Image (cartoon, rainbow, N blue to C red):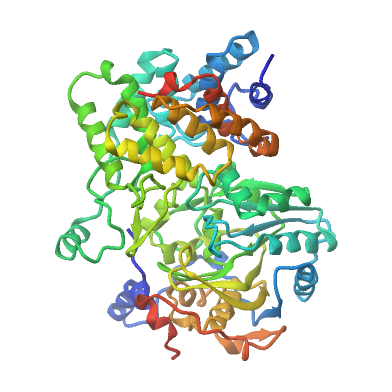
Amino acid sequence: MMLPQTAALLAGQNGDGGWPTYGDRVSNTEATSLATLALARLEGGAERAAAARGVHWLLACQNADGSWPLNRRMAAGSWTTALATLTLASLERDRAKALRGARWLLRQRPRTPGVVASLARRLAPYAPAVTLDPHLKGWAWTAAASGFVEPTAYAVLALKKLREHLPGTHVAERIDEAERMIDDRTCREGGWNYGNSTVLGADLWPYADVTALTLLALADRRGRPENRRGVAALRRMLEHVDSGLTLAWAALCLSAHDEDATPLLTRLCRAWERTRFLGDTRSIALALLAMSDGARWIAP
Amino acid sequence: MSRPLARRAFLGGALATTAAAGCARPRRWERTAVRQTERARVAILQAAGYDDRLVEVVRRGVRLFALGVAGKRVVLKPNFVEFDPGGVVNTHPALVAAAIEAFRREGARQVVVAEGPGHHRDTEHLLTASGLYPVLRATRTRYADLNTDDARPVPVASHYTGLDHLYLPETILSADLLVSMPKLKTHHWAGVTLSMKNMFGCIPGSIYGFPKNVLHWAGIPESIVDINSTLPVRRFAIVDGIVGMEGNGPIQGEARRCGVVVFGEDPVAVDATAARLMTIDPRQVGYLAEAGRFLGHLAEERIDQIGEPLDGLRQDFRVLPSFAGLKRFA
C-alpha cells in the first residue's frame, strides 16, 4: 500500500516535473532534489515515473558552469547545487553532470573578513563579536556571504559521494577544512545551529535539524568523540522537537550512526497525523527517505 | 560580520562626504522612496495581558486609522525569529490571533500570516513550539513561509547597502496591506528591533542565507533602511509591547512588562514612539535617524499621539553597554 507521504509527493509535483516547497509555487532545486531522491528508490511505476521527471527537471536546470540555480527564474548558481549533485550521485545517474556540480562546489569560496578585520581579530582576540574562526572555509548560502554550517554539510555530503571520481587532493583538502570549520562552530553543549556558537560572549543553543544534518555529513567518521558528543546532544534536543523535518533528519542521522531510529519513525508518523508537516515538500521527502532506509543512499 | 553600529558610525560616510563638499548631507534615496507626510499619527493602547480582551484592543487600534481593509488582502508579519521555551522572543500568538480576528471583522477578504524566520529553517517546529500553529489552525488562516516563497527582484529605492535590488516574496508584493507585528525589543546589533527591523523577515532566506547573511555583510542598519524604503506596499504596524524584551535582545534578553500595543501607519513614527516607551532616544538609533529624513517622522512634535499619552507608560529598558548612548536624550 502506498504511504501517505508518497501520495502527497506525487500529488505535489508540478507539471514541469519539479516540486515547489509549498503548494502552488514554482519548482525549486531543493525540493525537487529531495523529492526525487525519496521517490527514486521506491517500488511502483508512478513513483519511478515521478522521479524520472524530477531527474529530467534537474538536468534541464543545470547551468553551463555546473551549478544549479534556486529555481528556473533565477540564473545564478546557488547552495542547492550540493543537493542536486548529491541526488544525481546517489541515484548513480548522469555522473558527468553530477561531477560538474561537484567541481563548481570546489570552486566556491565563502567570504572572509578583510585585512582590517583580520588584523583587529589578531590584536584583540578577547573581544570578538563571534568566536568562530572566519578563515576556516566551508560553504556559504550564497555568493559574497560567509560560510555557514548547513550549506557546508550539504556540500560535504555531495563531495563525499563523489570523491573517488574526483582526482587530486583538492577535494580531500576542502572536505578536511570543512570538517574543521564544522568542529569550530560546535555549540558549547554539543550540536550545531546555523553557524554561531556564541555572540557577544553569550552561548547560543544548537538546533536539532542542523545537528542531525551535520552529523549525517560526518557519518563516515562516526567513531570520533565529536560525533558521539553531537549524537548525545541531538538526543537531548529531540526530547523537545516534534517536527517532520527534524525527526526525519534525525532518523537518517541515527541510522547512519548505526543507532536505532525506530522510535523516531514512530514519532514521525504521529507528527504527520498532527500537522501533515505543513505541506512542506522537504519534510515529506525526508520522512519518506527515513522510512525507506534512505540513509544508506545519502550518508557517506 | 556586523558590529553594533551607533548613529555616529552609521552616518560617518555621509558626514565625511558632506564636510568635504561643504554642503548639506547628501540624499541617498530615490524620490519614490519618500513616504513622509505632513504629520504622523500613532496610537498607544493599553492591554492588560494576552487574553480575550485583546481582540477589542486591536480592533480599536485598527479603527483609529480608518484603514479601509474591506475586501482587501491583509498580510500579517509577526516576529518569529527563534523559539526559546523560557523566553519572550516572539510576537505573542494571542496578539496574532487578535489581529486575524480584528481584520476579518473589518471585512478583509483574506488575512494571511507570513514570516521568514532569520535563524530557523524548521518552520513546523517554530510554529508548533511557539504556539502559532494552533492559532492558524483554529482560525483557519493561511501561513506563508517567506524564506521559500516565490520571489522577484525589486529595485532598491534608497542606497545604503549598495545592493541594486532586493528579492521580495510574492506573498508580500501581492498584499493590499502589510502589517508589521514586531515584539518591543532591544537588539544587540541594531539597538532596537521594532516594526522596521521586523521587515528583515520579508527577505527570503533561501536567497539571502540564514541568518540573512548577505544583509549582515551589507550592514544591518543600512539594510533596515533599504528594505523599508523598497517595500512597495501599504504598511501598518502593530507592536506587541504587552511584554517586551530588554538587555541582550533580540533572543537572549529578559522579559519586561509594558502593557501596551502600539499602532500606526508611519513605521518611523511607530518605532520612534516605541523606542521612547523603552526610554531610548530614537535619534540615537542610526537607522531610525536616517529613516526619519525621508521615510517617516522621528520628531516627537511631528507625531500626534491619538491613543494614550506616552508619559506615564515609559519603562526604563536595559540596553547592552555598547548601546548606552541610546539612553542619552539630546
Question: What is the quadrant of residue A165 in the picture?
Answer: top left
Q: Is residue B319 above or below residue A53?
A: below
> B127 or A89: nearer the eye?
B127
Question: What is the quadrant of residue A101 in the picture?
Answer: top left
Give how far across and how far down residue A127 sits, in percent: 24, 66
Give how far across and how far down residue B127 sits, in percent: 62, 49
Residue shown at the point (40%, 52%) measured from the top left: B213
Q: Is residue B227 above or below residue B254?
A: above
> B287 or B160: nearer the eye?
B287
Q: Is residue A292 above or below residue B167?
A: above
**Badge count:** 0
Residue shown at the point (38%, 81%) measured from the top left: B324
Could you tell me which quadrant the C terminus of chain B lies in? bottom left
Could you tell me which quadrant the N terminus of chain B lies in? bottom left
Give how far across and how far down residue B82 sits, in percent: 52, 55
Q: Is residue A150 in view from this perspective?
A: no
Give how far across and how far down residue B59 sits, in percent: 79, 70
> A88 or B292: nearer the eye?
A88
Q: Is residue B308 left or right of residue A182?
A: right
Q: Is residue A277 left or right of residue B31?
A: right
Q: Is residue B320 left or right of residue B292?
A: left
> B234 or B310: nearer the eye?
B310
Q: Is residue A85 above or below residue A52?
A: below
Q: Is residue A287 left or right of residue A133?
A: right
Q: Is residue B254 in view from this perspective?
A: yes
